[in-house]
Image (cartoon, grey):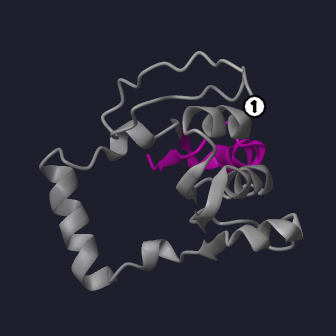
Amino acid sequence: MSYNFKPSNSRFGATDVVNVAEIDAVEAVRDLTDGGVHYSFEAIGLKVTTEQAWKMLKAGGCATIIGMIPVGTTIDIHGPEFLREKKIQGSNMGSNRFRIDMPRFVDFYLSDRLHLDDMISGHMSLSDINDGFAALETGKVARNVIMFD
């Protein structure tokens, strides 16, 4: 099957972009990578994207779940895929060393080497917080910044 992959113009280093509104993400990534990836990272915290991160692994690959999956959510993994020596692991805040890493991240941001502004989906007031949480649950936005007046 052929997919229309578009090179990324992102400053985040992506070489290809898959538009999941148009095609199946797992099939597209497996096709693009000749059978799957060695490493996948889920950063949204949704059941569907966590399962996709697992399914797009090749044999011996590892999926790292960074996103905060809601309490009570169960992730479905096809058991026999473990026989292909695939792994899934979680990460709490990137396993960072807060006192060391946070000042470095601030320096990266201030020197335009960490592009946090590009990761913001939108801005909202505190009075719109419930709408913000509802939008996060749909997966249509990744991050909104609350503006305090």
Residue 129 among magenta residues: yes
**Residue at 37% over, 78% down:** 96
Q: Which residue is mark 1?
A: 24
Q: Position of residue 98 (x, y in %)?
A: 33, 81
In this view, 19 is above or below 118:
above
Examine the rendering and report whether any part of residue 5 can be seen.
yes
Residue 29 occupies which quadrant of the picture? Answer: top right
Residue lying farthest left? 111
Q: Is residue 37 left or right of residue 113?
A: right
Q: Is residue 70 left or right of residue 34?
A: right
Residue 43 occupies which quadrant of the picture? Answer: bottom right
- Secondary element type, mark 1: loop
Examine the rendering and report whether any part of residue 73 can be seen.
no
Q: Position of residue 136 (x, y in %)?
A: 69, 47
In this view, 48 is above or below 31:
below
Which quadrant is home to the N terminus? top right
**Residue at 87% over, 73% down:** 72
| Residue stretch rendered in magenta on the structure | 124-149
In this view, 148 is above or below 97:
above
**Residue at 66% over, 71% down:** 88
Front-most of 3 and 19?
Answer: 3
**Residue at 42% over, 22% down:** 7
Amino acid tagged 1: Asp
